[in-house]
Every structure is written in C-alpha cells, then in structure tokens.
Amino acid sequence: MRVLALGGTELKLLWRNRTVMFMAIAFPLGLGGYMAYQGSSFGGGGWGVVVTLQIMLVLLMTVYITITTTLTARRQDLFLKRLRSGELTDFGVLAGTVGPVLVLGFAQSLVLAIIAMAAGAPIPANPLLFAAGVLIGLALFAAAGMASTVFTKTPENAQLTTLPIFMVAAGAAASSFLADNQMAHWISVALPGGGIAEMLRTGWLGVTWDGRSVGFVEQLVSAGPAAGASLLWAVLAVYAALRWFRWEPRS
C-alpha cells in the first residue's frame, strides 16, 4: 500500500511539472499521432516502421529520459534519502518512483497502437511478440534511466547525459529498417534498441528483416536473436542500476 501511495504522489508530481509533462506525455503522443495519420503514405509495409518508431519514441522519451530526470531531481532534493529512512525498502522506494512512469509508457504504447489501427494500420500479426517487445523495452529503458543517474548531477544535465544512449538506440532502431545485408542487420540488432525495434516490427507485420512473410512460430524464431540481445542489455542495465545507483546528491 505504501508503494502505491508513493506511486500516486509521484504521478501527481509528474502532472504538475509542465516541462516533464510535455516531454513525457504531450510530445510523444502528439508526434506519434501525427506519424500515425501520415502512415498511409508508406503503404502496408510502412505501418511496421511507423508503429515501431512510435513505440521507440515512448520508450526513449516517456520512460528513459523521464526516469533519469525524475530520479535525479528526487535525489537532489533529498526526497529519496528521506524515504529510505522510513518503512519502505530500497526496492519499494524505486518501485514507487519509477512505477508510474512505466505505467504511463505502457498506456501510451497502447494508445498509439490503437491510433495507428484507427488510421488504417493492420492489426498485429503476432500480438505476443509485439507485447514482448514493449515489455522488454520498458524494462531495458527504465533500468537504463536509473543507471544514467549515476552520471547526472542535476535534472537539467539529464538532457545531455541521456543523449548517448538516446542516439545509439534511435540509430539502431532506424538501422534495423534500412539494413540491406545480414551483417548490417545483426549489428543493428546487437545494439540497445535495435533488437526491440526488430521485435516490434516483426510482431506487427509478421515479416522477417528481409521482407519474407512467415508464420506465427517462424516469427518467434526469427525474432529470437533480437529478443536475446535485448534481454541481455536489460539484465546489464538492471545490474548497473542496482550496483551503482546513488541515493544522495552528487558533489
């Protein structure tokens, strides 16, 4: 109950912060909605790219950057330190602070998927694979956000400290669409974000990276390396977050 109460308080604080609200809610949803209504110009296959970019936008902006900014702000004003002196465990403190952002990211992903289908996108060919991509992506970028606070002194610095992972993940996602040979494809999948994009696109369209339409089981098999690489990055991010996360302000 205390974790839920903390989560409710955190959600209210997010709504009251106009900058965070714009970056975490208005901007991803607005841009994602615009992309959806432009998606018909890409043809049937283009919807996989559109929807994947929508979800990646949510994962990077709503989840990754917001968690980095929020935890850094709570650490700087000693809010996390005060919570640790109470009855909540360390895990409870982090769950109550990060949980609302994860719920928000999942809700936005669902809304954007519905908007895309309303704009003409086909229904997901493999909902299980698509959902797995969203959930693994949430875990990966939430942990990455926690780990990024190690290098972030103030909330204002978050715009700079999150840039490397943001650019790598966005570039890997884009490369997964543009790869014209197997080597380039595997490199993009091996990078953080590339595997997530591969799972999302394959789950939505039911085709492999080279455009072959395959059945349900083959879709899962073809996305196996992408899922494995993404899970590995998620585990490494969780380890880094738990190992080096700082509870008190950086000097």
Image (cartoon, rainbow, N blue to C red):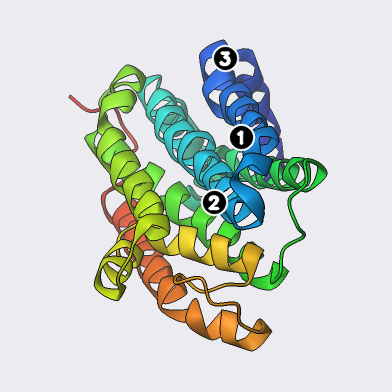
Residue at the disc numbered 3: 17
Residue at the disc numbered 1: 35
- The structure residue drawn at horizontal position 38% and vertical position 66%, both measured from the top left corner, is 235
Say which of 174 and 23 sits in front.
174
Distance, label 1 to label 2, CA atoms, is 10 Å
Say which of 233 and 147 sits in front.
233
Say which of 188 and 162 sits in front.
188
Q: Is residue 246 left or right of residue 51?
A: left
Q: Nearer the viewer, mark 2 or mark 3?
A: 2
Residue 220 position by quadrant: bottom right
Residue at the disc numbered 2: 49
Q: Position of residue 55 (x, y in %)?
A: 57, 46
Callout 3 amino acid: Asn
Residue 27 position by quadrant: top right
Q: Is residue 6 visible?
A: no
Q: Position of residue 106 (x, y in %)?
A: 66, 47
